[in-house]
Amino acid sequence: MLKKLGKAVRSFWRSESGLGTLEVILIIAVVIIIALLFKDWIIQLIEKLMGKADDEADKIFSN
């Protein structure tokens, strides 16, 4: 059973369609890792941008 699994993994790795799938999975994994590493910075940036948008909206509606 383990040999069959190994053969299936090797054939998946060698096939072009499998390679495309593997590339997508690796890209997603890298994006998730980067997002986790910079999570605090991203949250601060979004809060800052939303605060600016809120201030501008208050200016528009107060006039």
Image: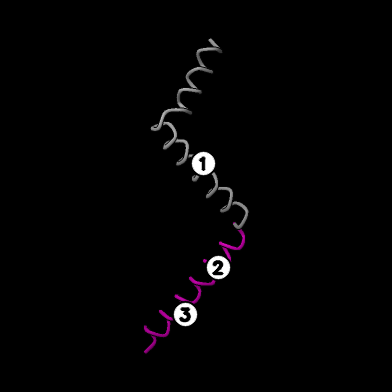
Tell which tag, 1 or 2, sits nearer the viewer. 1
Q: Secondary structure at mark 3?
A: helix
Find out whether residue 20 is within the magenta segment: no
- Counting residues from the start of the chain, the first of labels 1 and 2 encountered is 1
Find out whether residue 61 is within the magenta segment: yes
- Counting residues from the start of the chain, the first of labels 2 and 3 encountered is 2
Tell which tag, 3 or 1, sits nearer the viewer. 1
Residue depicted at 49% across the width and 45% down the height: 28
Q: Which residue is mark 3?
A: 55
Q: Circle 3: is it few (<14), some (14-19), or many (20+) Cα within 10 Å?
A: few
Label pair 3/1, CB-CB below 8 angstroms:
no
Residue depicted at 36% across the width and 90% down the height: 63
Q: Circle 2: is it few (<14), some (14-19), or many (20+) Cα within 10 Å?
A: few
Q: Which residue is mark 1?
A: 26
Q: Which range of residues does the magenta coloring cover? A: 39-63
As measured in the structure, the alpha-carbon distance from the residue carrying label 1 to the one carrying label 2 is 26 Å
Foreground pick, 53 / 5: 5
Foreground pick, 54 / 22: 22
As measured in the structure, the alpha-carbon distance from the residue carrying label 3 to the one carrying label 1 is 40 Å
Q: Amino acid at mark 3?
A: Asp
Q: Amino acid at mark 2?
A: Leu
Residue depicted at 42% across the width and 85% down the height: 59
As measured in the structure, the alpha-carbon distance from the residue carrying label 2 to the one carrying label 3 is 15 Å
